[in-house]
């Protein structure tokens, strides 16, 4: 297998592996838990499809978005696109707004333990990603570092970002 084929297979495997955290974040429990926080990326479409058996298909969203977001990964691109830095900054800023706006609902419906833990995990996730993206911004990148940063970003989006805080419908 030549280098480009290896890169394509690696990118496909990375994207397909996003099914696991998306499944854990949405389907591994019947209500929000620290391991299964019902992230907005999958829970909102799942609510719209709740009357159909198709609601489980929403776990493919992080993988589909990963593939569509940075198609350069299939070519082995080493440079992180500017839009990825902007996406990370936007998701981080919106996470703060998300937690500020839904904090009291999380305390009321999921309880303090869940709300504090889920927010701490999100802070940790944003911090790790922030260091990854900062490192990629400041020095020459590699395909592996580019892939890892994007994979981690979409794991966060599919598993933990914008967790459900509030009363279930």
Image: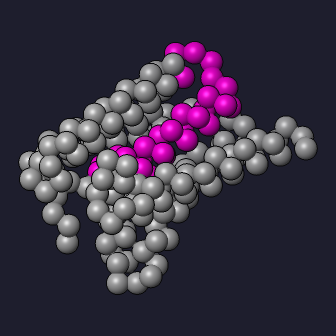
Q: Going 90% across and 40% down the picture, which residue do you hit?
A: 2
The image shows residue 45, relative to residue 161, as above or below, that is: below
**For this view, does 13 lie left or right of residue 104?**
right
Q: Nearer the viewer, residue 51 or 142?
A: 51
Front-lying residue, 133 or 85: 133
Q: Quadrant of residue 78?
A: top right
Question: In the rendered view of the protein, which quadrant contains the N terminus?
Answer: top right
Q: On the rendered structure, is 59 left or right of 79?
A: left
Q: Is residue 12 above or below residue 136?
A: below
Q: Nearer the viewer, residue 89 or 18?
A: 18
**Magenta-drawn stretch contains 26:** no
Q: Is any atom of residue 138 visible in this view?
A: yes
Q: Residue at x 55, y 57 (%)?
A: 19
- In terms of secondary structure, what is the magenta stretch mainly? helix
Decide if residue 79 is in sight here.
no
Would residue 158 be counted in the magenta stretch? yes
For the view shown, which residue lies furthest in the right direction? 1
Residue at 62 percent across and 18 percent down: it is: 140
Left or right of residue 83, residue 2 in this image = right
Q: Position of residue 23 (x, y in %)?
A: 48, 59
Image location of residue 126, percent across then percent down = 37, 32
Locate residue 88: give its quadrant.
Answer: top left
Residue at point 44% right, 22% down? 131
- Is residue 66 rendered to the left or right of residue 48? right
* Magenta span of residues: 136-163
How is the protein colored in the picture? one colour
Count the marks.
Answer: 0
Quadrant into which the C terminus falls: bottom left
* Spot occupied by residue 156 in the image (x, y as percentages of width and height): 43, 43
């Amino acid at each position: 297998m030549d280098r480009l084929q290896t890169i394509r297979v690696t990118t496909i495997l990375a994207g397909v592996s996003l099914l696991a955290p998306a499944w854990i974040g949405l389907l591994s429990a019947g209500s929000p838990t620290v391991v299964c926080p019902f992230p907005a990326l999958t829970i909102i479409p799942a609510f719209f499809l709740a009357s159909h058996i198709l609601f489980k298909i929403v776990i493919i969203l992080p993988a589909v978005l990963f593939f569509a977001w940075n198609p350069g990964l299939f070519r082995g691109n080493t440079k992180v696109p500017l839009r990825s830095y902007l996406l990370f900054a936007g998701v981080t800023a919106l996470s703060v707004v998300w937690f500020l706006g839904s904090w009291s609902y999380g305390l009321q419906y999921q309880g303090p333990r869940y709300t504090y833990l889920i927010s701490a995990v999100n802070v940790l996730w944003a911090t790790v990603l922030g260091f990854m993206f900062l490192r990629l911004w400041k020095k020459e990148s590699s395909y592996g570092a580019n892939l890892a940063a994007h994979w981690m970003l979409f794991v966060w989006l599919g598993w933990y970002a914008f967790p459900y805080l509030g009363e279930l419908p």
